[in-house]
Image (cartoon, grey):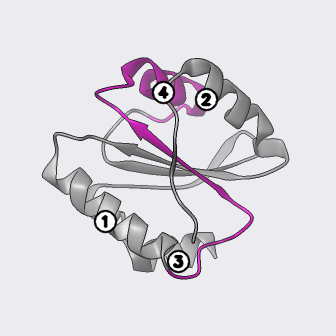
Amino acid sequence: MAQWKEITTNEEWEQLFAATTEQPIVVLKHSTACSISFIALEESEAYLSKTPNPDVEYVLVKVIESRPVSNQIAEDTGLRHVSPQLLYIKNKEVVWDASHWNINEKRMTAALN
């Protein structure tokens, strides 16, 4: 089963972002203080528990605890920060994103598989 890899530093983010030319990533920007974000995390974990895309690395950023990382992601991708927010990144470009109630297992399966 695929699992989220939590990152907490800009250095970790920079390495992962640069490596998207070799392996795409999915980033979940999660707020530990938001009930909608909690539901989005549950939905994304439901996706991961079934048949997630095996060619993708799954990255979790807790936006309150790791604010500088969240801000750097927004700057590097050009997407305004919201949470919860899900970003599918290939070749240093966001190819799909979703936020709030649009983060669910069905949409993730359609976009990522």
Amino acid under disc 4: Thr
Q: Is residue 60 above or below residue 51?
A: above
Q: Are marks 1 and 4 in contact (CB under 8 Å)?
A: no
Residue 100: give x, y in percent of width and height: 28, 55
**SS for callout 4:** loop
* Residue drawn where x is 48% and y is 76% of the image: 49
**SS for callout 3:** helix
Number of other residues with Cα within 10 Å of mark 2, as a class: few under 14, some 14 to 19, many 20 or more:
some
First in sequence, mark 2 or 3: give its number: 2
Q: Quadrant of the C terminus?
A: bottom right
Mark 4 and mark 2: Cα distance apart in space: 8 Å
Q: Which residue is mark 2?
A: 13
In front of the other: 82 or 24: 24
Between circles 4 and 2, the one closer to the viewer is 4
Mark 2 and mark 3: Cα distance apart in space: 24 Å
Is 41 within the magenta?
Answer: no
Q: Which residue is mark 3?
A: 109
Is 54 within the magenta?
Answer: yes
**SS for callout 2:** helix
Q: Which residue is mark 1?
A: 42
First in sequence, mark 1 or 3: give its number: 1
Amino acid under disc 2: Trp
Q: Which residues are drawn in magenta?
A: 50-79
Amino acid under disc 3: Thr
Numbered tag placed on residue 8 in the rendering = 4
Number of other residues with Cα within 10 Å of mark 4, as a class: few under 14, some 14 to 19, many 20 or more:
some
